[in-house]
Each structure stands twice: as C-alpha cells, then as structure tokens.
Image (cartoon, rainbow, N blue to C red):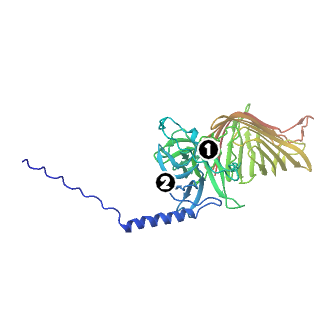
Amino acid sequence: MLPLAPAPPVLPVAPPPSLAENESIELAEAQLSQRIDKLRPQGAEPCVLHATLEVARRTIVACGSSGIWIVELGAEIGDRFVQRQPVMGRAVGLFSRNGRVWVEVETRSARPLDELDTSGAIAVPSDAVRLPLAEAPPLAVPLKPPARSESMPRAPRANMEVAILGRVTSAGGGRLVVDLGRQHGVDLSDRIELSVVTESPIGPFQNRQVLAVGLVTSVADEQCLVELGIGEDVPVGAEAALTSHALTHNRLAPARVSGVWTLAGMLRPFFVLDRLGIGALNELSLGYQSEGPLRIQLLASPLGFSGADDGSTFSALGVGIISLDTRLFELGLGAGAQTVNDSDYEPGSALTLSQTLRVGAIDGLNLSIRNDISLFHKEFEYSAFNGQAQVPVTERGWLVLQGGGGSVGYAFFEAGGKALVTGNGTRGSIFVRGTIGYAQLYESPGLFNFESNGFATSADIDHGGPLIGFGVEWRL
C-alpha cells in the first residue's frame, strides 16, 4: 500500500461576530436612523435607512420609499437637511462609479397576461384534458386608476444620478478653492455652480440663491480651482456643484461690486508749449459702494497747476457726491468748492453744485458725465463739464476716452487704456491706466490794465501742451 498523503493544514477561520458585536452594530444603525429621521422635512415619508454614502462632507442616504436624502451630520450649526430627491420605487442601495453616485432602485410592475412574451411558454398537447377556468366574480364598482396630480414630481429613471455638492474652502482675487476634485468627476474646463442657502422667513423652507457659475482652471484629486468673472463675489462656505449651465460672467455688463472702498488717483504731467514751463492736471478720489444701491464719493477733479516764464496758475474743484447706484445706471448730486479762473471778475473761489450720470456698468461698457455749476458773486454759472467713455476690449482690459474743461481754469482730452492687474474687481483688486492727450490750464483776470499810451493789456496766463497720464485704482 502506498502511504497516504498528509492532510493539508487547517487554516484558521475568523469566528462569526459575537452576539454583543451584532447588538452593537444594530444599536449604532438604530441611532443613526433616528438621527437622520429627526431631519425629516414637512410632508415627507419617514426615512427607512437602507444605505449611506459619505461624499464631500455630506451624507447621502437611501431612505426606501422616501427617496434619497442628502444631509450634513456634525456640521458647525448641528445636523442639517440639505436636499431630498424622490425616486420611482424604493431607494435601497448606493455606490460610486466613475466619480458619480448611483442609486439602486427597487420597483414592482404588473402586465396583462396576454401581453407577456410567449417565446418560452410550455406547449400543451392537443389531446390533453383542459380544465375550464373559473370565472372571476364581477366587481361591484369598477375601479378607476387615480389621476396623476400636476403637482406630483415625476420620478426619475431606475438608475438615478445624484449631484455631488461641495463647499468653497477659500476665496480671494476672483479665485475659489472647492473641495471637489477628480474623485468626484471634476475635470478641467468644467463649470461649477456656486450658491448660498438661507432659511425662508415664511416657513420651514430653504431658499437657494445662485451667486455665480465659474470655470474650473485646475484640478487635484479632492480639490479644484474655480475662476470667477469680473465683479463676481462668492463667500467661503458657499455650496458648489457641477453644472451644465452657462458661465455667468458678462464682459459688457459685469456684476456690481458692493461693500468696497475705492481709492484712485490720476497724474497728467505736461510740458508748456512755446514757453519754458511744466504743469500737471491731476485727479484724486475716495469712494464707497454700499451693499444697497448707494455710492458715496469725495472727488478732487481737476487738481492742476502750471508754471512758466509768464507766471503760474492753479485750478481745482472738490466735491462730495451721493448717488443712486445700480448695475447699469447711476445718478448723483453733490456740492463743494472750486476755483474760478475765467469770468468777468478777478479770479477767486466759488461754491459748486454737481450732477453726475452714468449709463452702463461701472466695470463694463459705460458713458458717464459730470456737470458743475458755480455760485460766484451771487450769480450761478455753468462752470465745467467732464465726460468719460469706457469700452471693454479684452476680458481684463478697457479703452478709455476722457475730456472736459470750463471756467474752473482747465481743459483737456485724453485717450488710453485701463487694465485689471490683480483680482477680479472685488476687494483687493488693482487697476492701472495709461493715456496720452492734451492739457491746458489758464487764468484770465477779467480786468484790463490801461497803459500810459492808452492801450489796454491783460495779464492772461495760458499754459498748454501734450500730456502723458498714469493712474491707479485700488479697491479695499
């Protein structure tokens, strides 16, 4: 006899979970089910917990016939219900594939017997004995299927995709970091919808306000970088989700920026032609754009001086302006003081009333004008005009034309460009501007000096020449 082969060693087998472990698991599931059910929205069926899936700090729950619930457990403000999605049937499972969440849906259906597929039916021999079918008892009242209510939501397909929601984790300069990445199906050039959710004042409802739709410019495994358009502002903590909606940026009429201060200055040095001299025609402004439709400005325009061999002159106008300011329109009134260098009297200073009008977005295509009226020697006079046209030529660049003048003692015209070098027009943004043109400062005494020979002379000062302008605007 041949010796028998030795028996293979017996591998250890993990023992089944003990009764205590099973009870612990069941207790944890019961506690989780109660915790989720406390978030049940009004009118919804109770959540019968079948499965959960954690995605981007949110919990997706398969709640049987109550559909899919998306909740936040352990948030800073406590557990929070986010969204409910009904399904056709019962949601009994969840799984993730290719960066998307799929829902397993269990359904029941019924079909008439004579409409079933007979390809697999069993044939009955012709000589077989056929037993008659018992007749069905008549129904006392024919039943009519209930009509579908117009307000009832239409259930989705059996395999339903659920939008994965993320959060904005940091923001600055028109760029956002969102906690959605390649693992959540995000790719370059995708679009992200950004919104905030607030509680409704009229009941237990939530209002979702879409702030912007941005463009994904960089992607990591669990994060992506989203770029916003000019003037678009999204806070940290806002909700983010992949979307097929169009980008919300608008180059001709970008969003109005609110809650920011603006500090701006413009230098326009020039050489005095036909004489040995120099001058400058400058501007300074400080403004605040409120959360509501209100804008406040302190403006010094012009703030000019010049000097040559025939003398020197100074021209200035300063006003405070309050205006009704919306995205596409601004109308304001102001008051201040100015120099009067050209009148029937000796040069001096006067009170000023100003009117301002802007048609178009402040960071888009617009035309703005300012009229100044002076009260000098108890007479009202039209003292100055200032106008500006702005035309977008690139995503972050504008063509600017500006000019004006009057009895304040100045005149100028310039053309140039404006560029956004930092940010997207919101807080922390910096614009720069460069121009060329012509500037003039003048002063006319209004009185004549009579010489001994009988001729009348005037000590007029008129300085003008080509200018080069440079300006900076900082929003803070």
Q: Which labelled disc corresponds to residue 213? A: 1
Label 2 – label 1 distance at C-alpha = 27 Å
Mark 1 packing: few (<14 Cα in 10 Å), some, or many (20+)?
Answer: many
Q: Is residue 248 above or below residue 85?
A: above
Residue drawn at x 68%, y 47% as measured from the top left: 264
Q: Secondary structure at mark 1?
A: strand
Please give the residue where the numbered disc 2 appears in the rendered image.
53
Q: Is residue 141 left or right of residue 67?
A: right
Picture coordinates of residue 246, whole percent (x, y):
63, 39
Instruction: Give whichever of 390, 455 is nearer the camera.
Output: 390
Q: Secondary structure at mark 2?
A: strand
Sequence-first disc among 2 and 1? 2
Q: Is residue 239 left or right of residue 443?
A: left
Instruction: Give whichever of 85, 404 is nearer the camera.
Output: 85
Which residue, as the protein is rendered here, is positioned at the far left?
A: 1
Q: Please name the amino acid that badge 2 sits on.
A: Leu
Instruction: Give whichever of 289, 446 is nearer the camera.
Output: 289
